[in-house]
Amino acid sequence: MIDEKVLMKLKHLVGLEYNKEVINSKYRWFQTNFGKEFLIKNNFKKEELLIHLFGNKEISNGMSLKYILERDSGFNTFGSIKGTYDFNYPIRFSSATYSWKISQCSAQTEKEVLIDEAIKELEVVIGEFLDIFKKVESLIPFSEVSKYSELDVFIKYKHKRLYNKMWFIKYLHMLYPQYFSNFYNNGSGTDWLPVLVSNLPIYKISNSKIICNGQIAAYSKKFNTNMYDFSLMLYEYCKDHSDFVNPLYTDNARRISFLNKHKGKKYE
């Protein structure tokens, strides 16, 4: 279990490691270019908006939502999702076939389409985004973890293709950083979310990224800090505490492997 006294001491150190205004300006830039108000009021032509949200590096000049969330090094400071499969996005542009593809965020459902159909799908996806953002804002300030559970059920059953997708959890963090952590992975192995939650004084570990985020966000309030600083505190803590590992690891080799992989690792 994490030593809260040590973690509290780290709070006073991490704030000295970066320029807060630079970080805050990145949040503001992202929210201006990809947030709810932009999706509602932008003046982009339909094809331009398609590229702006889901284009690859080549056709968007590295400025699309998809590229920035996953590949832009300047935004990996908010947590890395590198390695996300392209089919986990509802729309993408394929460099291999130089065509648009749409899916239910799975390889089995992906299909190549003409641009008119991709634009039609974009309207559906934006509707999904706005519906989820509306739900998030109705639950703010997320006064208890049960509010995250409510959001989890809402996304799982109403917008299933976006459920537990790392890129979408990062999207939520970038738009609502005070309510969602910047840890996105889930599952077994060396993923961060279950490791964090299993080492925090939380009575029940969830398989849901949304609920795990809620548990981490709720716990961070004890330290009166923002989610970005709290992530740095946890990374610093991990560097020097060999007990900060997933308790599901029963063999020492896996524990050592995990620690070697993450020791000294920050921002991703």
Image (cartoon, rainbow, N blue to C red):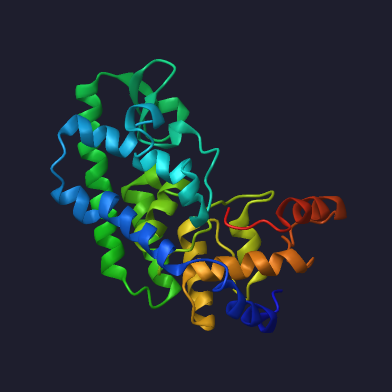
| Residue 63 falls in image quadrant | top left
Above or below: residue 48 compared with residue 255: above
Locate the N terminus by quadrant.
bottom right
Q: Which percent across, then down, holds residue 102?
A: 33, 28
Q: Which percent across, then down, holds residue 224?
A: 49, 82
> Horizontal placement of 102 versus 10: left or right?
left
Above or below: residue 36 compared with residue 110: below
Q: Residue furthest right?
A: 252
Residue at 34% in and 19% down: 99
In this view, the residue in front, 37 or 142, is: 37
Asked whether residue 198 appears in the rendered view, the answer is no
Above or below: residue 74 compared with residue 103: below
Residue at 38% in and 45% down: 162
> Horizontal placement of 230 versus 48: left or right?
right
> Horizontal placement of 265 versus 19: left or right?
right
> Horizontal placement of 126 versus 43: left or right?
right
Q: Which percent across, then down, holds residue 219?
A: 53, 76
Q: Which percent across, then down, holds residue 233?
A: 61, 71
